[in-house]
Amino acid sequence: MIKDNSKKTFLDSLWSFFTSIKVAVIFILLLAVIAILGTIIQQQMPMEFYQKIYSPLMYKIVITLGLNDLYNSFIFRLLLMFIGINITVCTIEHFNKRLMTGNFKICLPFDAYKSNKYINFSISLTFEKALEKVINYLKSKHFHVSYEKENNENIYVYGEKGRIKGWGSFLVHTGLLIIFLGALYGGLTGFKDMAFLMETGENKYFEKHNNFYVKLKEFRIEADENRRIKDFFSDLEIFEDNMKILEETIEVNDPLQYKGVVFYQSSWGMAGLQFLVTQPDGKEEVYHVPFDETDSINPGQSFFVLENRWIVKVGDFYPDIAFKGDSPENLSSLPLNPAVSLQISTDFMEKHMSGKEPEWKNLGWLYKDHPEAEYERYKFRFDKLIKYSVLQVKKDPGIPIVYFGCFLLVAGMPLAFYISRKIIRICLVKKSDEKTLIYMGFTGKEEEMDELKQMEKDLINL
Amino acid sequence: MSQLSNMEITSFYILRALFFVSFFAYIFYMVFGKNKIVSYIATGFLSLAFLSLTFNLLIRTYAAGRAPFSNLYESLISFVWGFVVIYLIIEHIYKLNILGIFASGLSMAAILYASVLPKEIEPLIPALQSHWLIFHVLCFVFAYGAFALSFGLGVFYLFLYLRKKNLGHLNPVILEELIYKIIAFAFPWMTLGIITGAIWADKAWGSYWSWDPKETWSFITWLVYAAFLHARYNYKWKGTITAILAIAGFAVVMFTYFGVNFLLSGLHSYAK
């Protein structure tokens, strides 16, 4: 390389800045340090959260630099862009220097063979015989051999193995760039959303981009013999123009894909209790008691009003009831056998107005095997526990690109790390008719001297 | 919750005792002159400890009906297994008995810690019931095992470098090369571990990368080792700086493995 700074243009120095290994190492470590920040500072919380936990100055720093959403922030993207440029420039440079040219020179200036990386010894063979022996020996050691005669006194031999190693690093870095591009493309053209679907089927998830909607038919839980959750399922229906197109069950680790949009089973919860009340004249009416935001029901405080006069309240709720003799117990927090005990008051209003305790009558526990209770010719039926299913909705057209990048990365790494590249250079010098002097050395590491000595022994003795 | 079989409990006691004995044998080897017979005994005990650990993992796999990777106890003893198998191979090739004190000591400490952790065989939570679990964890077992060894070698390198001396056939140049070889072995495994994790996360959670603390810290670990691999190309950094990076790399591994579970919450929180 020409070391004349005056002739360097700005572009040249920028190029050499990005090819510097020091710069690459500093970028990599800087990315690591910044990535740590995102695990210390809670991400994507509401602004009030940061106001509460940080001092005004810290709050300002966090918000201005975008540390509250670090991985989408300008700083982080800028750094990723720099690393992208770094990798691109180095890959081009590497491709030019290592793979296309260089290292193919068969002979070096004669003095190079006298450096301390080389050993020399002589064998009692004619010039031609010695050359034949050296070539056969290198071939038996799996080297690719080529040679060049300078004159009748000197022959230069070049042996190489593991040239494919150079492609390893090329594949790895290209793979990383492709992953970058795939993530960028996916981020620009895809979307991510959540769907909360009730078992009542009342609410739908509308997919605006492709004009279809999704409904939840049923949500199911599978438990093991110890009443712990094993798996959960959502029976989904897809509609297009109010026509049912598809019916499919999804579970954890097994999503549904429709028109490039993927629906993942993410989470679930309990939304409310549904009661069916049959009036004395046979008329049926549906009543709901909703759960609160924490998916629980507040016994004594949750109720529905019957015909504007009676109050029916939830005395207690057990998601998984069993009876030990007459006393009920709750076996787990999963809604495997939900039960509700109801209490009814017919004089709530009057008593409440006059400040007296209203009278409550117990209707007992209602559950699957005993769903109904009767009070003054009104039938109360615990119809069902309404659950909701949370789905992760996603469209990411960048995924095939990212996976292709990953494939290159995985293919390149063994080449780069598990193959060793070796270059051996030998110079044969004709001493006399029966004697040839051999200079021999590896390009690279000093600790290969032992191997060279072994090769010398082999060549002399074989 | 199923009870542990008597066989598993007994085999755990035996393997713990064997790690203890091998640790003291390596200390003996270190303190009372480097006797060849003592070194064979130490290696022998460590190999026995390794075999009983293998047996322990096999009966647990059989009892649970799945790979033993689901909670901290299971993953910890799996990681010890990976570490010891890599150490024993390297010891055999490079005659590194001097590092046995570190290898058996670290394994013993991990086994002691594992012995106070809850050991019941728990059923897998839905998100973990996938074949990807095996590939994903196995990759990290090999990667982290090798990183632990490169950490020991890094400390050893700095020790030799600062005292400017050689120990037997080991000099800083050979050690540096060995640290590189071990990290170069581990790095592709770690990359594959992250990629299998990403594919699995895409299938299970709907996103191949969500910057969850465990993911982020594994990425940070990956970056530190990437920095190590590049720093070697600078002759001024090759040696001391790279040894420090190898040590820092393992510190980050430890944080990714333990620290994230205890200090930061996220999608991997079941590994507590």
Image (cartoon, coloured by chain):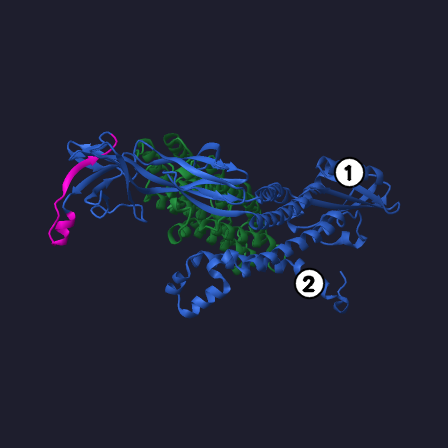
Chain colours: A blue, B green
The chain ID associated with circle 1 is A
Does the image show residue B28?
A: no
Q: Label 2: which residue? A: A14
Mark 2, residues whose alpha carbon is within 10 Å: few (<14), some, or many (≥20)?
A: few
Q: Which image quadrant for residue A366?
A: top left
Quadrant where the image shows the N terminus of chain A:
bottom right
Q: Nearer the viewer, residue A335 or A360?
A: A360
- Whether residue A181 appears in magenta in the rendering, the answer is no
Q: Look at the numbered disc 1 and give the secondary structure of its residue.
A: helix
Three-letter amino acid code at disc 2? Leu
User: Which region shows up in magenta?
Assistant: A348-368
Q: Which residue is mark 1?
A: A135
Image side of residue B146 versus residue A331, left or right:
right
Pick whichever of labels 1 and 2 is earlier in the sequence. 2
Which of the 4 image quadrants contains residue A230?
Answer: top left
- Of tags 1 and 2, the one toward the viewer is 2
Residue B190's x, y, as percent? 52, 45
